[in-house]
Amino acid sequence: MSIRLYVGNLPRELNREELEALFNREVGEVGTTKLITDRKTGKCRGFGFLTVESEELADQVIEKLNGYTFKDNPLKIEKANDKPKAETKDEQVVEKPSVSSRSNPRKASKGGNRRPQTPATIGSSSIDTEAAQPDPRWADALAQLKERLLAQSTNP
């Protein structure tokens, strides 16, 4: 049975061949390596995985290389936590505030390109007026408007 190991705290300037060479040099032929890279830049995201053939070999790699300094970074190596796919799906469900279609008729449509609603766009009753702050870009204009309204209400 193969064991998957998490390899963390990797340097950003690293490729898969260098990581594989490190394991082969320090432990011997261990298995396959996978380096997680950024999609845009192609650089290492700071972690990867190593798959080894046995539990004993996994323990040997952890014992020998956990804390090992590689390119000025102490490596963190531990057994990866593989979660069942059904469990990870349930965890990704995020509770959304329910809004009836009466209060927001567009909610009932299947518009895929709409921005998600924030509490400010759902309704004024869900916002605490004392905590709401004006947009700083319009703060001066808002202050002038308040002064005019105050002046109108005091002059009969």
Image: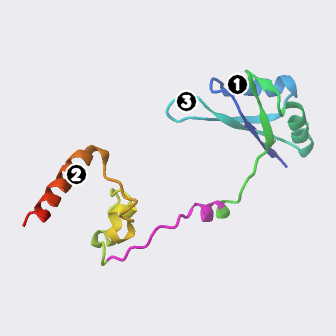
Going by the numbered disc 2, the residue's amino acid type is Leu
**Residue under numbered circle 2:** 142
Residue found 85% across the figure and 42% down from its top: 53
Going by the numbered disc 3, the residue's amino acid type is Gly
Q: Is residue 132 magenta?
A: no
Give residue 94's position: percent from left, percent from top.
Answer: 53, 64
Mark nearer the N terminus (1 vs 3): 1
Say if residue 1 shows up in the picture: yes
**Residue under numbered circle 3:** 42
- Nearest the viewer among 52 and 149 is 149
The quarter of the picture where residue 47 lies is: top right
Give residue 91's position: percent from left, percent from top.
Answer: 62, 62
Q: Is residue 100 magenta?
A: yes
Q: Nearer the viewer, mark 3 or mark 2?
A: 2
Residue 17: mark in rendering? 1
Would you say 51 lies left or right of 40 here? right
The quarter of the picture where residue 8 lies is: top right
Give residue 150's position: percent from left, percent from top.
Answer: 17, 60
The kind of secondary structure element at disc 1 is helix
Residue 120: mark in rendering? none
Check contact, mark 1 vs mark 3: CB within 8 A: no
Going by the numbered disc 1, the residue's amino acid type is Glu
Q: Nearer the viewer, mark 1 or mark 3?
A: 3
Write the start and end of the magenta stretch as one range: 88-101
Would you say 53 lies left or right of 49 here? right
Measure the C-alpha gap from mark 1 to mark 3: 14 Å
The quarter of the picture where residue 149 lies is: bottom left
Say if residue 35 shows up in the picture: no
Q: Main secondary structure of the magenta part?
A: loop
